[in-house]
């Protein structure tokens, strides 16, 4: 099954979601203890929140930036980076904003939802390191508000990342989803694009997802870190 496909595929693309980073200590969004179980995303992670709920917005994102500082990529991130170097996988499309794939050494990564590692001015666009939020400095030199360089609800996704994700999905003959509920568009379209182009679609997620019916293989109730370790050992044994 998936191990055989990893061995025989010519072009493997991985789509990751928040379930890829829970074993690093970061919460996901829609599990029972997920972020959106405690906050309404439209009221806190939206451009509207920047205007109408700014104190809560700053507090929410400062908390997430501080949380990021205490966490780091886990073995699963490092295995994906190793597999890229070994040619086992070709690229990663991620919905995550933690920067952990790059930090673990992956190079071919499309960050669909931007990054928490940076903040920028909502008015002039000037970019700063996310330390500004750590130090509770929320204002640009121009007087504009500083916001994280993540895609807020109501905003367009970065053109370059979208283009790369579409191109990679069309080239894939093996497409693996790791740790996403696949509920958010357009990220949840890329597995379907790959499938329509003849790819073998494997969905690895603790809980069933909305796209399981399209998958050639689903693996639930397994932790991603452990599973990637097992697959890596299987590849090494070949
Ligand atoms: N191993 C396997 N699966 C896991 C693990 C784990 N260790 N931890 C969590 N999961 C699964 C959960 O069961 C859940 O179904 O990962 C999935 C994560 O789904 P979501 O929380 O919905 O996160 P994601 O799919 O990445 O959300 C997409 O929504 O709010 C937006 O911008 C936000 O990028 C995010 C997008």
Image (cartoon, helix red, strand yellow):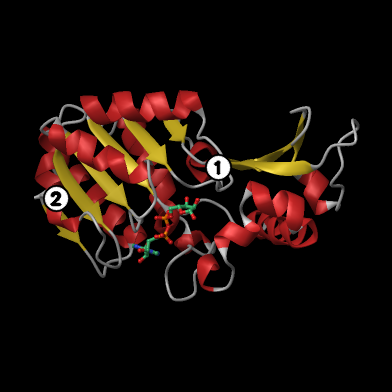
Q: Is residue 195 left or right of residue 188?
A: left
Identify whether 63 is placed above or below 122.
below
* Residue 190 appears in the figure: yes
Give the mark, 1 or 2, whose residue is nearer the N terminus: 1
* Residue of label 2: 214
Q: Is residue 11 left or right of residue 77?
A: left
Quadrant containing ligand 1: bottom left
Front-lying residue, 95 or 228: 95
| Quarter of the figure with residue 166 | top left
* Residue 237 appears in the figure: no
The crowd level at tag 2 (other Cα within 10 Å; few <14, some 14-19, many 20+) is: some
Element assignment for label 2: helix
Tag in front: 1 or 2: 2
Residue shown at the point (42%, 70%) measured from the top left:
31
The image shows residue 100 at horizontal and vertical percentages of 52, 45
Looking at the rendered image, the quarter that the C terminus falls into is top left
The image shows residue 176 at horizontal and vertical percentages of 25, 45
The image shows residue 179 at horizontal and vertical percentages of 35, 56
The crowd level at tag 1 (other Cα within 10 Å; few <14, some 14-19, many 20+) is: some
């Amino acid at each position: 099954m998936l191990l055989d496909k990893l061995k025989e595929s010519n072009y493997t693309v991985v789509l990751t979601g928040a379930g890829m980073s829970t074993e690093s200590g970061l919460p996901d969004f829609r599990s029972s203890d997920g972020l959106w179980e405690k906050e309404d995303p439209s009221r806190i992670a939206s451009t509207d929140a920047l205007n109408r709920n700014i104190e809560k917005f700053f507090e929410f994102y400062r908390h997430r930036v501080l949380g990021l500082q205490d966490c780091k990529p886990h073995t699963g991130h490092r295995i994906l980076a190793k597999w890229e170097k070994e040619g086992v996988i070709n690229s990663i499309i991620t919905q995550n904003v933690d920067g952990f794939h790059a930090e673990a050494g992956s190079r071919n990564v499309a960050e669909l939802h931007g990054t928490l590692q940076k903040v920028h001015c909502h008015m002039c666009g000037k970019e700063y390191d996310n330390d500004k939020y750590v130090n509770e400095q929320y204002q640009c030199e121009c007087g504009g508000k500083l916001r994280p360089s993540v895609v807020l609800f109501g905003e367009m996704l970065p053109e370059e990342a979208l283009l790369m994700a579409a191109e990679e999905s069309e080239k894939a003959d093996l497409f693996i989803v790791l740790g996403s509920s696949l509920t958010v568009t357009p990220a949840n379209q890329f597995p379907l694009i790959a499938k329509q182009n003849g790819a073998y679609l494997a969905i690895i997620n603790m809980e069933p997802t909305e796209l399981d019916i399209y998958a050639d293989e689903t693996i639930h109730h397994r932790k991603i870190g452990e599973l990637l370790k097992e697959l890596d050992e299987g590849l090494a044994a070949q």
